Image (tube, rainbow, N blue to C red):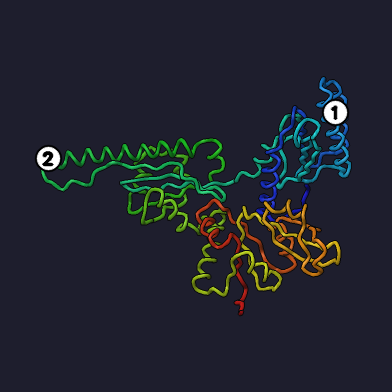
Amino acid sequence: MARKKQDREMEKYWLKRMLDEIRKKEGRGTELISLYIPPNRRMSEVIGYLREEYSTASNIKSDTTRKNVQDAILKVIERLKYYDQAPENGLVVFCGAIPRGPPGSEKMEIYVIEPPEPLKVNLYRCDDHFHTEYLEELLREKEVYGLISIDINEAAIGLLEGRRLDVIATYTSGIPGKHRAGGQSARRFERLREMEVHHYFDRVAKHVNDVFLREDIFERLRGILVGGPGFTKYNFVEESDLDYRLKKKIIDYIDTNYSGEEGLREMVIKGKDILKNVRYVYEKNLVDEFMSRLARRHDMVLYGLKDVMRHLYDGAIEKILILDDFDYYHTKLKCESCGYKEEKMVKAKDIEKLEHSGLKCPQCSNGIMYPEDTKLLLDYLHDTATEYGFKVEIISSKTEHGKIFKQFGGIGALLRYPLRY
């Protein structure tokens, strides 16, 4: 469904959630329409094109497929009549007959999406699935940082992309410690050791070149951080076969206590001023602030669904932190007998049962309460945020800090002032 302009992260969340749902849809044949309309295109032109496709579809041999395609085209045309021209970022429509069971159980579904960024594709396609890949491309992070953590014993390379820290590879050098014996054998040993160090550096550099110079990475590579204990990180850059284009991308050297994979994570922490606009770092800082307050000023945080919702309308909440996979819905129930109303938080798996069977009314004991309005809790919080002056921050459940935050119920709040009980 089309949405008004929202916070960038919330827009991306909504789009990702919708695409996850649409991607699962399958048709019985090439009956599902994917329509991408570029920005500001006159809708009368698009509708004219669709009417031509309607006529062409009359040549489809299968009666069922022909009917489903033509019905879908007509439904899309009816929806496009609400627009004089495509919005400033364009418009995407998915429409088709989705099977619910055996043949004849199909139900026509339509999804209309205003993308968060301008579309660069003009597409009409009928297939057995919806073509979401062009919208998925908009979710791809525009900037990525390369990370290299190295000392004489081990190394690791990684990519920091949005809310993901991907460890690409780890290495061990196998280089022995410095020989302390005197004489010719010691000098020979030292020369061999230097050759092994150089080979180790080049082995790491070759993999860095292979990964960071890939077209899909290099064009988005905002910078490279090189970290590790001591001077090895500087020697690596100066003495290895690291490509000159990547050397120009190095924006800082970071001293760390560790190398390898642990070193990558330490670099992200110590480089937070440089990486402050990266979503991974931003979310980590939020969770760190939550944990810090919990340890020092526990009355300045809330955690768990019950406590957050109890104080949602108090004005004390500054920010709500919620995991992106938090699977609760906010529903407003109304008794069909006495009119009593109640708000309730319901797990996603229980929504269908609630809509079908309802709940016994606690007010009159005779009636049944059924949902009047149901929203994903995150959507409800976002809609409520402006009125009550708090922000909603989505935390990825797949990161280390997201997994830590999940132990506190997956939802929490930073407060403006302490609550006294």
Q: Quadrant of residue 136?
A: top right
Above or below, comparing residue 92 to residue 231 in the picture: above
**Residue 222 seen by the camera:** no
The amino acid type of the residue labelled 2 equals Gln
Above or below, comparing residue 167 to residue 35 in the picture: below
Q: Image point 45% across, 50% down: which residue? A: 225
Q: Secondary structure at mark 2?
A: helix
Q: CB of mark 2 within 8 Å of CB of mark 1?
A: no
**Residue 7 seen by the camera:** yes
- Image quarter where the C terminus lies is bottom right
Using a 10 Å C-alpha cutoff, classify the residue at mark 2 as few (fewer than 14 neighbours), some (14 to 19) or many (20 or more).
Answer: few
Q: Position of residue 383 (x, y in %)?
A: 74, 61
Query: Relative to 228, is 1 on the left or the right?
Result: right
Label at residue 67: 1
Cα distance between the residues tagged 2 and 1: 89 Å
Pick the front one: 30 or 229: 30
Above or below, comparing residue 23 to residue 225 in the picture: above
Q: Which residue occupies the extreme front position in the image? A: 366
Residue at the disc numbered 2: 184
Pick the front one: 167 or 201: 167
Q: Position of residue 12 (x, y in %)?
A: 67, 49
Q: Secondary structure at mark 1?
A: helix
Which one is in front in this view, the residue at disc 2 or the one at disc 1?
1
Q: Position of residue 251 (x, y in %)?
A: 47, 50
Q: Image point 46% across, 35% down: which residue? A: 210
Q: Which residue occupies the extreme bottom position in the image? A: 420
Query: Relative to 290, is 393 on the left or the right?
Result: right
The amino acid type of the residue labelled 1 equals Lys
